[in-house]
Image: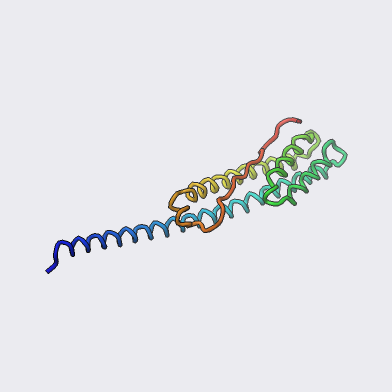
């Protein structure tokens, strides 16, 4: 026959076991979600990089179309610097390219390059927004107490936002 203390012991052990099981399931689902978000961040960064590279190619084409135009040399150099920039210096290089694009005259550009540049700028804007949305979601989950305490994200750092000036209007 079971005594009251035996029943209490069984209830406490069962409750503790259920709590540990719940914690394990919650940890696994959060770790899986964080992994998916990190994959989403990586894919969004690849798309952003492709859009930025396309914009740099268009900028070089604009500079090559009229090499004697004011700012064409600076535009070509900024485009080359943006393409060669490391991930840490990419924001600054892309901002320099935006400024160089704004400083060149758009009156002598061919209509095809004007349309190509507008499309490239739009793609950069959209890709940057998708990337920053993915970063926001990953940082929100990665910053939760449980994720930090149990190190569900491993030792990796939280992703950083990519902030650039999308369009610079006028000459500076």
Of the 4 image quadrants, the one containing the N terminus is: bottom left
Pick out the residue farthest to the left. Answer: 1
> Does 108 sit above or below residue 152?
above
**Residue 73 percent across, percent down from the top left:** 84, 42
**Residue 133 percent across, percent down from the top left:** 54, 45
Residue at 43 percent across and 52 percent down: it is 146
- What's the image's color scheme? rainbow
Pick out the residue farthest to the front. Answer: 5
Q: Is residue 44 left or right of residue 69?
A: left
**Residue 170 percent across, percent down from the top left:** 73, 30
Residue at 45 percent across and 54 percent down: it is 149
Q: Is residue 85 left or right of residue 133?
A: right
**Image quarter of residue 100:** top right
> Does 144 sit above or below residue 168?
below
**Residue 114 percent across, percent down from the top left:** 73, 39
Q: In this view, does 12 lie to the left or right of 87?
A: left
Residue at 55 percent across and 48 percent down: it is 135
**How many tags in the picture?**
0
Of the 4 image quadrants, the one containing the C terminus is: top right
Pick out the residue farthest to the right. Answer: 68
């Amino acid at each position: 026959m079971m005594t009251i203390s035996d029943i209490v012991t069984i209830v406490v052990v069962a409750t503790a076991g259920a709590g540990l099981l719940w914690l394990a399931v919650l940890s696994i689902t959060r770790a899986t979600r964080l992994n998916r978000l990190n994959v989403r961040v990586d894919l969004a960064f690849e798309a952003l990089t492709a859009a930025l590279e396309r914009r740099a190619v268009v900028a070089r084409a604009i500079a090559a179309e009229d090499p004697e135009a004011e700012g064409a040399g600076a535009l070509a150099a900024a485009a080359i610097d943006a393409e060669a920039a490391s991930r840490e210096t990419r924001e600054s290089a892309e901002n320099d390219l935006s400024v160089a694009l704004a400083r060149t005259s758009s009156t002598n550009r061919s209509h095809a390059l004007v349309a190509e540049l507008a499309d490239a700028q739009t793609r950069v804007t959209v890709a940057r927004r998708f990337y920053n949305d993915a970063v926001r979601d990953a940082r929100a989950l990665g910053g939760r107490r449980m994720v930090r305490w149990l190190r569900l994200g491993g030792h990796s750092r939280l992703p950083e936002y990519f902030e650039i000036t999308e369009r610079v209007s006028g000459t500076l």
